[in-house]
Amino acid sequence: VAVKRSQTLAAARAKHPQRFSKATDPKILALPGPAWINQPKEGTETEAA
């Protein structure tokens, strides 16, 4: 996916260089871990009846 994305960005950059501020691809960052408002306690699972 990253290679295809890079190729697509390179083609767009070649066609419309004025739209891009950098000649490099943006970094693909790792997804963040889970975020909780009220984190459930470990080992407690509730099952729908």
Image (cartoon, rainbow, N blue to C red):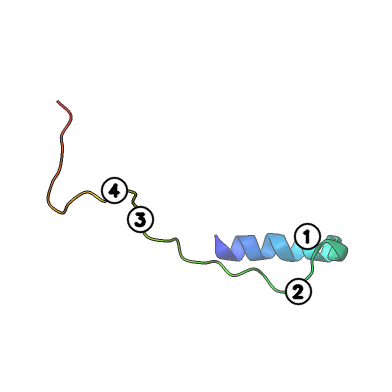
Q: Residues within 10 Å of mark 4 (few under 14, many from 20)?
A: few
Q: Is residue 30 above or below residue 48?
A: below
Name the residue that disc number 1 marks: 12
Distance from the alpha carbon under mark 1 to that under mark 3: 34 Å
**Mark 4, secondary structure of its residue:** loop
Q: Nearer the viewer, mark 1 or mark 4?
A: 4
Task: Tell me whether circle 3 and circle 2 mark residues in contact (CB < 8 Å).
Answer: no
Q: Earlier in the sequence, mark 2 or mark 4?
A: 2
Task: Tell me whether circle 1 and circle 4 mark residues in contact (CB < 8 Å).
Answer: no
Q: Nearer the viewer, mark 1 or mark 3?
A: 3
**Mark 2, secondary structure of its residue:** loop
Q: Earlier in the sequence, mark 2 or mark 1?
A: 1
**Mark 1, secondary structure of its residue:** helix
Q: What label sits on residue 23 in the rendered view?
A: 2
Amino acid under disc 3: Pro
Q: Earlier in the sequence, mark 1 or mark 3?
A: 1
Amino acid under disc 2: Ala
Name the residue that disc number 4 marks: 38
Q: Residue at x 76, y 74 (%)?
A: 23
Q: Earlier in the sequence, mark 1 or mark 4?
A: 1
Q: Nearer the viewer, mark 2 or mark 1?
A: 2
Q: Residue at x 54, y 60 (%)?
A: 1
Tell me residue 9's x, y (percent): 71, 62
Q: Residue at x 56, y 64 (%)?
A: 2
Distance from the alpha carbon under mark 1 to that under mark 4: 44 Å
Q: What label sits on residue 34 in the rendered view?
A: 3
Tell me residue 48's x, y (percent): 18, 29
Task: Tell me whether circle 2 and circle 1 mark residues in contact (CB < 8 Å).
Answer: no
